[in-house]
Image: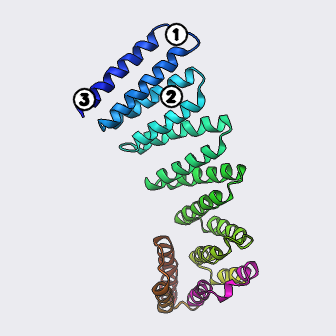
Amino acid sequence: MADYAAKGDELEKKAEKKLTGWGLFGSKYDDAADLFDKAANQFKLAKNWSRAATAYLRVADCHLKSDSKHEAATAYVEAANSYKKFSTQDAAQALNHAVNIYMELGRLNMAARYCKDLGDMYEQEQDLEKAMDFFDKAVDLFMSEEGTTSASQCKQRVAQIAAQLEDFAKATKILEDIARQQVNNNLLKYSAKGTLLNAGICQLCRGDPVAVSNALERYQDLDPTFSGTREYRLLTDLASSMDEGDVAKFTEAIREFDSMTRLDPWKTTLLLKAKKTIQEKDDLDEDLT
């Protein structure tokens, strides 16, 4: 490890010397960038991620000075990969530089891809507002490049985060829009029932069983096959349980569905929230009697 770090130090010194010397037509920046890049590789071998990240930032700076923007963006991505080992905040900053350059160059698909990565990073850090912003940005960029599948995946993430932030109206609208697109796509139409289930769960969290019943009517119009699915029956039973204020019936409907189709943590969390609204209503009714 020490040998790799020493080699990295040596290459960095050579790069710095190149920058202080004379160079024609920006060649000193190209030469220095090559040396900084080699230094970064040595630091990675030494597992000195901080030095590697810093070296990649120097690579990016050299490329920007020689107007090699694509190479600069690549270096920022490499810096972000090293920063990820110890600092999400610094990784995000470096990756955002790459996104801005790719957008400037018109490489919108690349920019979209790294916006999605930024969304993932901020979601892992529980900075949900920033995560949602970057997933939203990724949607727009993917759509501009006709990347409908990737855009749909990012829309799903936006809806999930919106629900976590208790913006159930936004989450519901996004999920219903996605389901509408899925129904009209032969390859994706079988996914619509799961998306409509998610939309219905978001409706349940708003605590209005009438709104859920109205939504289920819309969903049948949107997808005539939906009424024959277990997802539809679950939502119908949950809406009925909520209308009756029957917590036991609500819980049993979930248990029965989960025994056949395992509910993921996102659905489970939201269903627990919906169940809580029934319990709170019961408590309020008891206080009033």
Task: Give the residue pinned by disc 1.
Answer: 23
Task: Give the residue pinned by disc 3.
Answer: 3
Is disc 3 placed on a helix, strand or loop? helix
Residue 185 numbered tag: none
Residue lying at 67% horizontally and 83% vertically, measured from the top left: 226
The 10 Å Cα crowd at callout 2, few under 14, some 14 to 19, many 20 or more, is many
| Magenta stretch: dominant secondary structure | helix
Is disc 2 placed on a helix, strand or loop? helix
The picture places residue 281, in percent across and down from the top left corner, at: 52, 83
Q: Are marks 3 and 2 in contact (CB under 8 Å)?
A: no
Which one is nearer the viewer's eye here, 262 or 167?
262
Q: Quadrant of residue 7?
A: top left
Task: Give the residue pinned by disc 2.
Answer: 60
Q: Which mark is first along the chain, 2 or 3?
A: 3
The kind of residue on which mark 1 rests is Gly
The picture places residue 201, in percent across and down from the top left corner, at: 58, 76
- The answer to whether residue 220 is magenta is yes
Q: Magenta stretch?
A: 218-241
Q: Quadrant of residue 214?
A: bottom right
The kind of residue on which mark 3 rests is Asp
Q: Quick check: 91 left or right of 215?
A: left
